[in-house]
Amino acid sequence: MSGSPRIAPDSENEDFMTIFTRLEQWEERGIISSEQHTLLAGLSSGEPFSLFLELNILLYAGILAFVAGLGWTAATWSRQLGDVLVLTILSTSLAACFWYCFSRAPAWSPGEVPSPNLAFDYVVYLGSLIWSVELAYIENRFHLLAGQWDLYLLATASLFFFLAYRFDNRFVLSLALSSLAGWFGLTISHWPSDQDAAYRQYAVLYSVMVGGAGAALQRRGLKSHFFATYLNIAANVLFWALLSGVFNREGDFVWPLCLLAACGASLAWGLARRQFPFVAYAAVYGYVGVSSILIRDMNSGTAVLSYFVFTGVAMIAMLVQIARRFGKEA
């Protein structure tokens, strides 16, 4: 038989059009946001997508794991290797990291400064962690300050603040704020039951000071993009301190009222500034605090389990809906 052959329809193109049509319908119904629609449509058409955030997190986690292994090796094999060799390796690594950073860092600016290359921020973070390992090793082996860790923490916090602002690194800023928290007496190992009230007061004072300092620096235009880091850490420390008071049943209703006030402020801030983490803080910390009060008088394990199953599912569903709404309005 002669004649030109019939051309079969392009099934792949039809499949794509079907997927694209469904995505448009989902977007119109509010099931997915416009950003999700764009991402899914690109994936369906075979377009590349960015894995920068995932790779960034993995690299920072890898650095943290490497330094943890380095510290374990130094502590475990210090007698076999000798203090001189261990300190030489740590000091050489530290000097190499700082030399690399200072030799390649762009000029300092009060605003946000992009990294000169992909490895720069990771090297800054690595050098900061190695400093902590070496300092801990020196004190454990030689007791130069007779165990006065407050001085080490204050010196470390000062160094990390300098590095964070010099190299514009928010991860190092988090290390600085954590070291400052340790200097305030917020280490978990220093929370005996008879001093809970004192450490809780330190925690509240720390939160107020950190939040106030972040707001003041933002107002002066000094690394304004660091304000979110200050505020997130201050909020979490404050909520943990308030929860501690709720759990210990001190001050009757003082701590529960303070917790509810903090949750209200966090919720208002998150809604006004379109920042979902603060909405989540208000929901999660408020849920934990209120739940601890409600289940105090429950003697039935079944009742407690049922409470957490139903309320936990409701809490997760609520947060998912709020997150979707934030995604639509972003």
Image (spheres, helix red, strand yellow):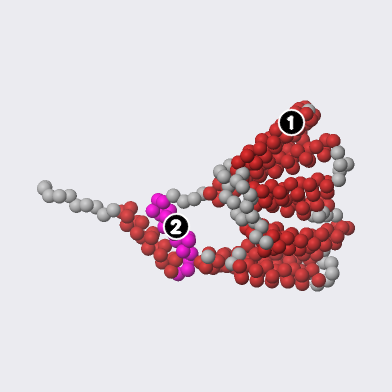
Query: In the displayed structure, would residue 45 be above or below residue 61?
Result: below
Q: Position of residue 65 (x, y in %)?
A: 66, 41
Tell me the residue that label 1 is attached to: 88
Residue kind at label 2, given as amino acid type:
Leu
The amino acid type, in three-letter code, at marker 1 is Thr
Task: Report helix, strand or loop for mark 2.
Answer: helix
**Looking at the picture, how far across and down is residue 187, in whole percent?**
79, 52
Please report the residue visible at 46 percent of the width from the left and 64 percent of the height from the top: 34
Q: Within 10 Å of the Cα at label 2, are there few (<14), some (14-19), or many (20+) other Cα atoms?
A: some
Q: Which residues are magenta?
A: 29-47
In the depicted structure, whether residue 304 falls above or below residue 177: below
**How dense is the environment of label 1, judged by Cα within 10 Å: few (below 14), some, or many (20 and up)?**
few
- Specify the quadrant of the image occupied by residue 321: bottom right
- Tell me which residue sits at (61%, 47%) in the image: 107
> Where is mark 2, residue-wise?
40
Q: Which mark is residue 122?
A: none
The residue at the far left in this view is 2
Q: Position of residue 207 (x, y in %)?
A: 75, 61
Seen from the viewer's position, the closer of residues 31 and 99 is 99
Residue 15 is inside the magenta segment: no
| Marks 2, 1: nearer the viewer | 1
247 relative position to 109: left or right: right
Q: Is residue 31 magenta?
A: yes
Image quadrant of residue 181? bottom right
Q: Is residue 69 above or below residue 315?
A: above
Kindly tell me whether residue 91 is visible in this rendering.
yes
